[in-house]
Image (tube, grey):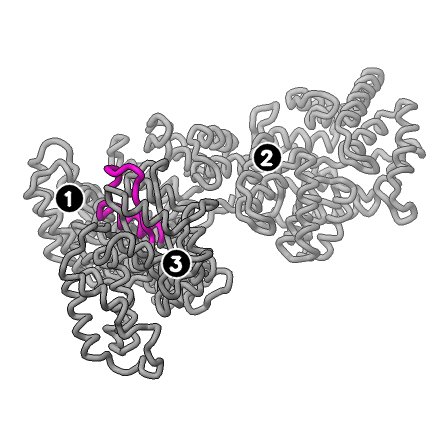
Amino acid sequence: MPKIIFTSQYMRDSPPVQLENYVKYIGTREGVEKIDESKLLLPATVKQQLLIGQLIRDIPSAKDMLEYADYCESPTIGNATEFISLALEQNLNRIGKRENYVEYIARRPRVERIGEHGLFTDAGVPVALAQVQEDVCGHKGAVWTHVVSLRREDAARLGYDSGKQWQDLLRSKKAMLCKHMKIDSENLRWYAAFHNEGHHPHVHLMVYSAKDNEGFLTEPAIEAMRSELAHDIFRQDFAHIYEHQNETRSQLKQGAADVMADLLSQVQDHICENKAIEADLLLLARRLQNTGGKKVYGYLKADVKAIIDRTVDELAKEDRIDKLYRAWNDWQNKILKIYTNKLPPLPPLSQQKQFKSIKNMVIAEALKLGGHHFSFEDEDAPEPELTEPANGEPEEAFMEPDDVIFRAKWSEQYKLARKYLYGSEDVPQDFDKAYSLFLMEAESGNALAMHDLGRMFADGLGHEIDLQAAREWYEKALAAFLSTEEEKPKPYLEYRIGKMYAAGLGTDQDYGQAASWFQEAVDKNHKYAQYSLGCLYYRGQGVPQDYAQALRLYTLSANQGNPYADYELAKIRRDGIGTQVDTNISTQHFKAAFSGFYRLEKDSHDDKLQYRLGQMLYTGIGVDKDVQAAVSYLEKSAQLGNVNAQYLLGKVCLETGIGNSVQAIAWMNKAAEAGNAGAQYALGKLYRDGTHVEKDIQKAVVMFTAAAEKKNEFAAYQLGRLYLSDEGISKNVPESVKWLTLSSDLGNAYAQYTLAKLYLTGDGVPKDVGEAIRLFTLSAEKKNEYAAYQLGKLYLLGEDVPKDVEAAIRWLTASANQGNQYAQYALGKLYFYEVDVPRDKEKSLYWLELSAAQGNIYAQYLIDNINSYRNPSVLLAATRLMHWLENLFREDYRRTAGIAAGHIDRKRRQKLQEKKQAQGHKRDDHAPQIHL
């Protein structure tokens, strides 16, 4: 029985004769009021049984009452009495005069009275019983009577065991009554009374229009009102359950979810071998070849539709699909049972409206068979997942050393100011004293002091951050450097001027100017200028990108003892950029870099050096990993205003649990406010995911945007994904394309891949296959296995581009060598057939076994049938259809259960992983992560 009963009738002025006898019973029955409670549990009397039989014959709708269900389950005197009483009460409008009905619902026993009676209507409107009776009797049109009944336990739990809750509910439902009963709001008249009956508290509701000929009520409208009332009443139930953590209901709900998930998993891991489906698919393929016009179900002839329907229903006979369909139906019925009296029978799958899209999938598979298309069976292929650089380094502009080797030429006052700025073993850190000494030096014309004053204002060292004051001091410093260099050219001055142009300090950022100044100093063998110019060539900033030139300049600088150059050389050798990968040489350079940074920091306490040491100690690069030592260096650097250190310190503390998350977020915010793109990007991810902070997509967008505007490729990519996802912000494809294009232009392989898919499908942008191929190629050349796989598919299918089997094999092999199971399967299948390439059993087995080891059921099937020359295309088509159905069930279940797409509970995920491992799947059988 449903949890809520909602009945609707209308009053007649002249009641049917066969019901008039009941009126007497209402007053003289073996009533709830007088009966001896000790007899309530005895079997129903013969008189009660006869009367109940007559009631069911004369009022068939009484069988739908909760009280009748109770009586059938336990035919006692008490249950019989309650059913007879309420059946008569709910049909009093069919029995007595209208004035009698009004008086009865207003004054009957257990009515919750408001003054002298129990009637109520709109808030603030007084109800006079005699006046209501007169109005109802004088009304020439229909007067509808509704009864809403709940079980006692539900009413008590939800608060509907008192009139106040019912008053609030019904007073909020005027719009519902007007809409479904077709009554203008100005003409609506309604009155209700709450009856606190023993097992089933209920409310009577009379509704009519002030206009005699207005209003009508249909069965669909009754169902709609029943559904809306149930939704409102039991929404409270769900809130109540959540608030009090009703463990039993949670377990039942989780149990249903587990059943669905297990069944979905079984379908996903199953091959469909069904001769009837194979025969129908081949028949359909032949029929479609001779069918003109649109190949869509709605446009096909009846006999062709019959083949499709038969195929779908044959699919439904598969044991796993049958169980899944029935489990899905049970899930639907749990919702329907709340408010409906009758559950619809389970129709054949081909007639189930929610899954009608499977019919067009059948057509698509038949067309593939008829056209002898190569199929890839990659419907479950994941999208690539973006992960952070493995070395933990944030994106940054220039990580330049300060010029500690020229210390002998600095004035004593300037050197003392720097000691106060950074602190040393004999001089405690004191920003005020540092500022005073720098100011005195600056006023005497010292460009170095002017530069340091600019930095103190920019980073908020001893003062609030003041970017205007910082710019003014940087402008003075640049002017002083230029004037000094003009009088007496020195490589050190040329290097410092180049640094200011590169960083945009005191002037607009100009990499071309920076490169010119660095070149002047490089020509004089200045080691830091060699390093800085190498950075420009490496990034292609102000000069053409040239890895060989960058390698040459880094080597020159490293040979002169510059640890920064050693560090860059180590990365180049590690990653094989512009040269061969050589981990031994890379390790040597990393160790040399760490030793050099340590030696320089010990003398200078420079924040940039402290940052480098902290970063290397945390990642274990060039030295044994030591998180505590790393945090110590990063804290010193962060306190000196180094924004990279502030960002990395926050990140380290969050990842390791050192300190507290509030302080870690505070460090990140400080770096983000100072314009650090890495910190802005990291905060964007925290706000997007709701990790350590409250989830806030709008704040995530702000942070990602700030970082992306500083050319952070990862932030631009994430912005593009957000605008495509419609999560927390409106979907905006043009805005997505804008940011994905920026990220793509910056070389992000994920953005190139995502953008290529948009151009390939024409989703929100004009379709441009040439641009899609270009972007897929760029991404694939950066070792994106998914892009390489897409290129292989495109060239093998020959639909959007001319077919090129050689290119297809080249790209599929590139993807397969990176572990892509779908590319491995495609190659294995390609060599299994004797179509585009000669059959090669050895090659086929090699690739299929690699794919099957990752859980690919299609690959395993081909392995099991490697000695058969039977074309398995039809069987694979049936299997794909079964998996399409599985996806349809999953999406409908998620939508009904309110589960976000792609979301799965962590514990549930762990259970499924353990189950898959028990079935022989690899532990890491999931969407692979590509590290940039």
Task: Report the Cα–Cα distance between label 2 and label 1.
Answer: 49 Å
Q: How far from the left and from the top, in percent, is residue 148?
A: 33, 57
Magenta residues (range): 205-229
- Mark 1 crowdedness (10 Å alpha carbons): few <14, some 14-19, many ≥20: many
Name the image quarter holding the N terminus.
Answer: bottom left
The residue under the point 59% across, 50% down is 584
> With 551 as the anchor, is 190 left or right in this view?
left
Does 642 appear above or below 332?
above
The residue under the point 36% across, 37% down is 185
Which residue is disc 1 drawn over? 366
| Sequence-wise first label, 2 or 1 | 1
Q: How far from the left and from the top, in percent, is residue 515?
A: 66, 23
Which residue is disc 2 drawn over? 707
Residue 194 numbered tag: 3
- Element assignment for label 1: helix
The residue under the point 69% across, 46% down is 666
Between 393 and 89, the one nearer to me in the picture: 89
